Every structure is written in C-alpha cells, then in structure tokens.
Amino acid sequence: MKLQIAWLGLLIAAAPLSAQAQPWKFDEPVTVTKTHNKKIFHHLESAGRHNIAVSADTIAVAWEDNRDGTPRIYLARKARSSREFSQEVKISGKGDAFEPSLIALDNHQFALAWEEDARIHARLVTPAKLGPVIILGERDAMQASLASHDQQLLLVYSRRDGRFGRIWMQAIEIDGQTLHPKHGCAVDADPAQDEQLYPAVVSLADRIIVAWEDRRPGHTIIMTAQNSDLKSCRFNSPQRISEGSSRSNPTYGKGHGVARVALAQYGTGQVLAAWADKRDFREGYDIYSANYRPGNKQLFGPNLKVQDSFGGIAQQWHTTVAGDPSGRLVVGWDDKRDGDANIMLSWREDDGWSDDVAVPGADGTGEQNHPTISLDREGNLHLAWIERTTVNGPTRLRYLFGQAIK
C-alpha cells in the first residue's frame, strides 16, 4: 500500500511539469457527428490508424457506424476556423463496410479505401462531390491502408491467398476525380507461411515502405519491406522490425505478441514505426517504436519504448503516430493508468521520448479510446477518438485541435 501511494504521488508531482512542457495548446473538444444514441456504435479501426487527415484548412474524419443497422463508412469535414463539422456523408455502398483508411490530397481533396463485402473499395472526395467508386477484383480482401505518391495512390491490404492472408500493394492512378488501378503485387514475393495482417504504408521521394503484422515464426512480429524501383512493383526481401524479448517466460510459447503497426513520415526522408508490444509479460502491452535507417542493411533501428515509466502500471492500446515536415513527431494511444481510459501523447525530444501527457478534453471519467492523430504542415495536432460516458456504453465521435506552440 505504501508503495502504491508513493507511486501515485510521483504521478501527481510529474503531471504539471509534463503539461507545461507540451508543444500544443488544446481547444475544447467538439462532437464530429450528431448521429449518436444508445444503439449506435462508432469505430475508428483502420489499418495504420489513418482516420483523420488535413488538406489545406479542411479537416476530415472517416469512420464506420451502424446507424441504419448495417456497418457503413461515413465522412465529415470542417474548416479549421469552424467549430462544427458538416453533415456527414455516406461513403460506402449497400454492403457491410469496415475500416476506412483516409489520406489528404491537395486542394481540400481526400482519398478513402475500405473493405465492403470482402473486397477493397476506394474513391476520391472533393469539395464539390464524391468521385466514383472503384472495386478491386480480388475477394477475401480487407484492412486497406493508403498513401500517395507522385499523383497516384498506393493501396496496401491483406488478401486471402490459399490458407493465409498475404499483404498486397496496388498502385492507382488519379485522373481528375476518377481512379484507375495500375500494377500491383505481393509485398513479400514468397508465399505466406502464416497470416500477414494490418499493413501500413508510407511513400518517400524514391521509395515505398510497407510494414505489417506477420505470424511466420509461430507468434506475431512486425515485418517490413522496401521498394526502391518505383517503375515496378518489386520489393526487397522482408525484414523483421520488432525485436524479441530478453525475458524468459514459458507462457509465451514461441514468442511474445505485437499488434497494429503504424507508420509516419517526418522531417526529410525519415519514418517512424510504432506498435503495441507485449515483450514485458508482467505489464501487458507497451508502445514501442523504431526509426527507419536509409542506407542501412537493417532497414529499421533498435526498438525504443515510447511511454514513460509511469505507463508501466497500465496496458497501452491503439497506437497512432504522426509527423510533419519540420521533424515534429508524436505518438498517441489509450491506457487506464489513472483509472479511466484516457488518450495519452508522447513526442520526440532531443534525448528521446517525452513524459506522457493525458490530452485535456480526452481524459476523465468514462472511456476515451481508439485515437487517430494527424499533424498539419504548421505542426498543429488534430485528434479524433471514441468517447463513452460510461464504460461499455454508447459511443460518440470527438475531435480536438491542438495549436502548435512555437
């Protein structure tokens, strides 16, 4: 008991210092959609956690909910100067739809990809209207994730290939408001040895990087592959990002688990991978990261724990990461270290990761979870998440703006 009280005292003492040092000043949160009641459940569950994006001064949020009894994809937008989101628009069609991935394009335009009726769908959203939907031909496809490169989209997803899911990439040409599928390929040229799931993708000037969950060693690890020949769809041999545990625990079996890698580009040609990792079996999942190292034989460097030592008393979930061209980099997640599920942030500092900060307006009683974040070109932070006023109660979709402190 004395140890618990002392630990709590340290948490309270450290919190104000962290809050004073944070690089954003947060507005009051706003509700993204007015369509919510005890029978409606909202989900922010895309591969790579890309559910919020900013194009010029337009902010967009994409999600899935069941307001008409069927899971469908919706999008809402607002101008940065506005306090309210526009009426949401339905993005998906008549089928069961899940896990929208959203990215920003130029001039207030966005692109989305999602799973519907076990196929991958995609379309553009302009200020005036929705572009036509394209449907990739393969069935048993899911977990879409998007990036953009040189006037085209890069779409990665998991598709059933024999016994296992396998990661594929499809290049898609943008022609006005219309999308045209081009070449595609399996990211790992060798047949899958076990499940490959939940991919994430980033595009640099001269290369494409894909990461995903992979179960080839008999437990889940994070893998990556790189394509440096953009005229083709050939990736190098995949490499492991997540490291093994140094602790011995017979309950692990062949190894510990990891979950849901997210990728973000920051600075000039820099990329961070972050994920939930259970290598410390006494504490459950922690947030780990690794930096991309261009020119190195090993594509990603050593694994670093993101959350601070106070986070060791709670499990971390739902990793999301964002960066900006100036080099600013931030990781978000949710955990229950303070008794309630709160949204936490840690950002890169000169000597590593900052102390964790519970986001004002995204903490407190009830549940605040499933965060998705984006940084605009000025370093401002945009956050959306799922709020429940009571544990396991109905959901609301919330948004918060963080003004960058120069």
Image: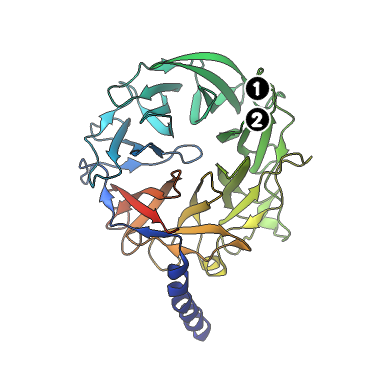
Q: Quarter of the image for the C terminus: give it.
A: bottom left
Describe the element under mark 1 as helix, strand or loop: loop
State the image coordinates of residue 295 (x, y, percent, origin top left).
76, 39
Residue drawn at x 51%, y 45% is 324
Q: Residue furthest right?
A: 297
Which mark is drawn over residue 346? none
Within the image, what quadrant is residue 279 found in?
A: bottom right
State the image coordinates of residue 114 (x, y, percent, origin top left).
42, 28
User: Looking at the image, can residue 193 be seen?
Assistant: no
Few, some or many residues within 10 Å of mark 1 (<14, 14–19, 20+): few
Between 403 and 72, the residue placed more toward the observer is 403
The amino acid beneath tag 1 is Leu
Which mark is drawn over residue 230? 1
Position of 141 compared to 177: left or right?
Answer: right
User: Looking at the image, can residue 210 be seen?
Assistant: yes
**C-alpha span from label 2 to label 1:** 7 Å
How many numbered marks have been drawn onto this rendered protein structure?
2
Looking at the picture, does residue 269 appear above or below residue 288? above
Which mark is drawn over residue 207? 2
Residue drawn at x 37%, y 64% is 340
Q: Are marks 2 and 1 in contact (CB under 8 Å)?
A: yes
State the image coordinates of residue 11 (x, y, percent, origin top left).
47, 75
The amino acid beneath tag 2 is Arg
Q: Earlier in the sequence, mark 2 or mark 1?
A: 2
State the image coordinates of residue 363 (x, y, percent, origin top left).
35, 61
Within the image, what quadrant is residue 161 found in?
A: top right
Few, some or many residues within 10 Å of mark 2 (<14, 14–19, 20+): some
